[in-house]
Amino acid sequence: MFAPRRYFPSFFLMKPLLFSLSPVACVGGLLPRRISNRGLASAVVGALWLVVGWTPARGAALAEGEIPAPVLAALVQVEAFVQMAEGEEPAAAGWSQRCPKCGEYHVNGLDDALADERPAAVGGYLVAPDRVLAPDPMIHPRFVREWRVRLGAESVTARPVAWAADRKAVLFALERPLAAGRPLVFSPQASGPYSVLTYSLEGDGWGALVQPLGGSWLTRPDGRRFQTVPGDSIVLAADGSPVAPLSSEILPLGEAWKAPFASWPWLDEAAYRDRLAAVESAASDVILHATLQLRPVPVQPGEDPSSDSDEDANATTLHASALVLGPGRVLVLRGLAPAVTARLESVTLTRGDGTVMPARFVASVVEFGALVVEPEQPLPATVRLAATPWREQRDRLLFAAEIRVKGEERRAHYRHLRSAATGVGLKGRDVPEFAGATEGLFVFDQEGRLVGAPLAKRADPGAERWASAPDPFTVQADELRVFADEPAAWADARNVPRSAADERSLGWLGVELQPLDRDLAQAHGVSAQTEEGQSGALVTYVYPDSPAGRVGLVAGDVLLRILPAGTQRAVPVRVEAFAFSDQPFPWDRYDQIPDAYFDRIPRPWAPAENALGALLKEFGFDSAYRLDYARGGKLSTLDLTVERGPDHYGSAPEAVATAYGLRLRELTFETRRFYQIPAGQPGLLVARIEAGGPGAVAGLKPYEVVTAVNDQPVSTVAEFESAVAVAQPLRLGVRRMHQTRLVTVIPTAAPGAP
């Protein structure tokens, strides 16, 4: 159909004609010339058809699947030769494309390209002898060793030189023209029906997919209509001539899409560098480093603090990024569980210039994993927040500060990115879709205003944080304004720092529990409710006058689920078996244990501080909740309120007798039950014995009960300390389960210094 014509003018004769017709510079010199009016454009189009030796027959249509030779000569591959940087694998936010055949996004994996020692590539279009229009890869320069553009066997060095401001396109400048390349010359006046050509890497190699333009329509609720098209493509007229490039996947009504790509708003290299530098400066002023100091976790003998699944649970120092919302308000982007916040002692903020400033805890955010602090002195710089909704930011050129805080080290990288689409997130919020991780990603617009910040939904009470910690997402910046106001509307009153004594308080139901297994679940008729014993807990004892006792729970009931008020997700009840749940405590071999191992001996009774109590405490005292349980296989529900429990072993008053190498604690409800010592009868529990100290030499062992000091019964710490202050040595009445003996302890220092 397209027979080549033999024209007399050669390329060298035509070149002066071509470039003398269009003297107006374009895109800051990024393209050689610009057509200044439609008449000149038509002349140039005609001249180029002469040069390449192909002219469409007037009124003719393309045969099925046919692509004109000049178009084929403009289809190139943009290659990125990637590398690792600072120990990080390369990542690109832009080279994931919606397949024009299946409609799904195909990710161009840079990690695979690195492993396979090959370049990652995407299709591009030659639009001038030394310029290529391509999808914006959005890859940080530190990951790119070299850019190249390939046409067949020929490859030349390239570099990005301009970025479209409102669509995901970039211009690459070639080191030299491709010998076999023929730039596309777009003819906006060419008539349809139109086809869309997409050049991409398919499963069996590179190819150009041609399909009719349109056919699918998208109608917005406000009545706006769009045609859906493959992005990163070009439109061909009925005769095969290129009409315009397309970078977006939706086209509004009308023919505005035919506008020359040179008329798109662009940022050249200088403007791009200026905007990026401005964002870096702003980010260093308003994104601070926060250091949180926590009180150490009190560890009881036999406890293994490293076994907790929450990495924050045993930390004494935590680090996070913090955002300055106002001179006296800073949002710390770190979600702490109530048990961790309870140990919070101090917060310091480090500015970009190294200045360190103390800050005061204001409140935890009830919805997000974050807390608000107030600096000791007003901060000079405050973030500017953009109000533009995410749906209006699609494909626009945005800038990102990637802030990664690992311990005291703070890494910051700055680049640009674009939102490919908008999804629906937490409570119906619009959430931008950025390829790659959004952790630590602060997004700014072209005017340097913050568009979005990385926050995560606060973890649900009882969630296994090691497996189900919510991922951060980019929250629209305008939503952060509320955290600069008074905290009544957004604060979590249950998630606050507490005293050491209050930290050890107990969420109280008043039951002893045994974890289920497959056999127990079947025996109690709850296999289906507990995933065959993987969750649920069997009640083995109910304390009198406890919340459980008042509502009628009895031994043999199976606790299934707890639903805190105001939530929709129930938490399965789970407890761990304690060390001596299935074997007796080795009282008969107790004297054979060296005193160096005393601190490793687990408690012989079921600890009151179990997973159920911790869960109730996380709900917050006085909070309502629903308890699902089973009795005889029949399901029932109770409505309860979280109550503060009585003193237990972990919170009991403690006497420290340094001169005797002893620590003793008052008996509590669970230890009196274990030792069968009724309320009102004397006794203090040996909590710790110093290895090699006077108590150990005298033969005292942990978890024995001291009933008397110098023949006087003792029940309280005050009574013991009074006896220690006036007596030397001490004669102790000691009970080991049901056996009693007298032990004499000789102090190593004056008795007046316990």
Image (tube, rainbow, N blue to C red):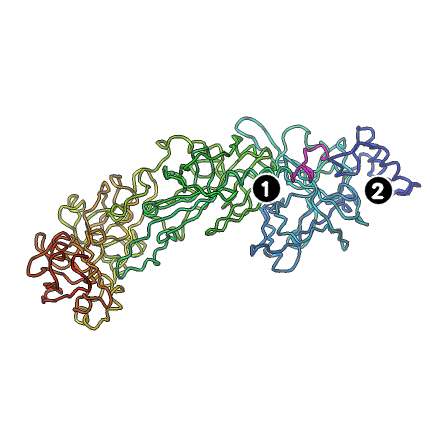
Q: Nearer the viewer, residue 76 or 750?
A: 750
Disc 1 target residue: 417
Q: Residue at 78% x, 33% y: name it.
A: 25
What is the three-letter code of the residue carrying label 1?
Answer: Leu
What is the three-letter code of the residue carrying label 2?
Answer: Trp
Q: Nearer the viewer, residue 59 or 118?
A: 118
Q: Is residue 449 magenta?
A: no
Q: Position of residue 342 (x, y in %)?
A: 32, 45
- Inspect this view and state whether residue 694 appears: yes
Picture layout, residue 590 above or below residue 430: below
Quadrant assignment for the N terminus: top right
- Inspect this view and state whether residue 584 appears: no
Q: Is residue 271 magenta?
A: yes
Magenta-drawn segment: 261-273
* Mark 2 → mark 1, Cα distance in angstroms: 40 Å
Picture layout, residue 139 above or below residue 432: below
Q: Residue at 16% x, 54% y: name it.
A: 666
Q: Position of residue 726 (x, y in %)?
A: 11, 57
Quarter of the image holding residue 100? top right
Q: Which numbered disc covers residue 54?
A: 2
Counting other residues with Cα less than 10 Å from the Cα at mark 2, is it few (<14), some (14-19), or many (20 or more)?
some
Q: Residue at 68% x, 46% y: name it.
A: 209
